[in-house]
């Protein structure tokens, strides 16, 4: 590649990356149903009774939003927001409590709450059941639906089961993958399992602390 081409690439890369990022976040907003929800519901200006930042959830057609949601329990409803970095065109919206339906769902050993927005439904959000329990407890007008109460201990148990399953799968992969070639030294079994166990353990402890903050 010539010097001029290198300079052109360096100059154009930030603009190309920004355009790709905006296109990707816009598509996520469309597939998640966010644009439909923000068109239906206003932002709302009432102060929150409880605000939980850096939460995770799944919206619309399986769009995962990990640690980028802000959920606020307000007197009249639930305000849902997303980090501006990951949703430059997605503004917060406030769904009245009367237009939220709740049902419990199981997901990888953990109990979650699927929230249905609108009557009839125009969108959905699946979040950790413990998170929903705290939001609903902050406002007397929040619906309980069929959601099952989740204690701190049961939440910790679910995270521990997830940690054990993920660590076993990752450790087994490293163990057998390192033994595919007889001419190369195999990774010791203790390292194969200890490394993912430590990594997943730290991640799960952070999740537990965040769920209780």
Image (spheres, helix red, strand yellow):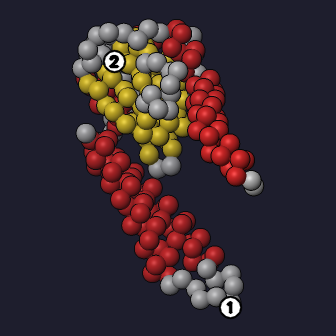
Badge 1: how crowded within 10 Å, few (<14), some, or many (20+)?
few
Q: Is residue 18 visible?
A: yes
Q: CA distance from mark 1 to mark 2?
A: 63 Å
Q: Residue at x 61, y 80 (%)?
A: 178
Residue 191 location, x and y as percent? 46, 78
Residue 1 location, x and y as percent? 75, 55
| Residue 55: quarter of image | top left
Q: Does 67 sit above or below residue 36? A: below
Q: Residue at x 32, y 54 (%)?
A: 205
Secondary structure type for disc 1: loop
Residue 93 location, x and y as percent? 44, 15
In the image: residue 32, left or right of residue 51: right
The disc placed on residue 4 is none
| Residue sticking out furthest to the front | 3
In the image: residue 168, left or right of residue 134: right
The residue at which mark 2 appears reads as: 142
- The mark lying in front, picked from 1 and 2, is 1
Q: Residue at x 42, y 60 (%)?
A: 200
Front in this rendered view, residue 146 or 6: 6
| Residue sticking out furthest to the right | 1
Q: Does 148 sit above or below residue 165? A: above
The disc placed on residue 183 is 1
| Residue 51: quarter of image | top left
Badge 2: how crowded within 10 Å, few (<14), some, or many (20+)?
many
| Residue 36: quarter of image | top right
Front in this rendered view, residue 16 or 100: 16
Upstream in sequence: badge 1 or badge 2: 2
Q: Does 148 sit above or below residue 77? A: below
Front in this rendered view, residue 88 or 30: 88
Front in this rendered view, residue 9 or 203: 9
Q: Does 129 sit above or below residue 119? A: below
């Amino acid at each position: 590649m010539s010097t001029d081409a290198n300079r052109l690439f360096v100059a154009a890369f930030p603009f190309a990356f920004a355009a790709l990022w905006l296109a990707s976040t816009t598509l996520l907003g469309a597939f998640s149903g966010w644009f439909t929800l923000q068109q239906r519901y206003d932002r709302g200006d009432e102060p929150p009774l409880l605000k939980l930042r850096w939460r995770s959830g799944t919206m619309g057609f399986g769009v995962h939003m990990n640690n980028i949601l802000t959920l606020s329990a307000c007197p009249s409803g639930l305000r849902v927001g997303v980090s501006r970095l990951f949703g430059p065109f997605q503004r917060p919206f406030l769904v009245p409590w009367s237009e939220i339906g709740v049902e419990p769902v199981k997901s990888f050993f953990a109990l979650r709450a699927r929230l249905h927005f609108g009557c009839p439904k125009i969108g959905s959000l699946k979040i950790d059941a413990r998170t929903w329990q705290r939001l609903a407890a902050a406002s007397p007008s929040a619906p309980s639906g069929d959601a099952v109460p989740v204690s701190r201990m049961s939440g910790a148990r679910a995270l521990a089961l997830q940690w054990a399953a993920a660590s076993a799968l990752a450790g087994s992969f490293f163990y057998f993958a390192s033994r595919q070639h007889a001419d190369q030294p195999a990774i010791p079994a203790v390292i194969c399992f200890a490394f993912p166990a430590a990594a997943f353990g730290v991640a799960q402890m952070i999740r537990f602390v965040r769920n209780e903050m």
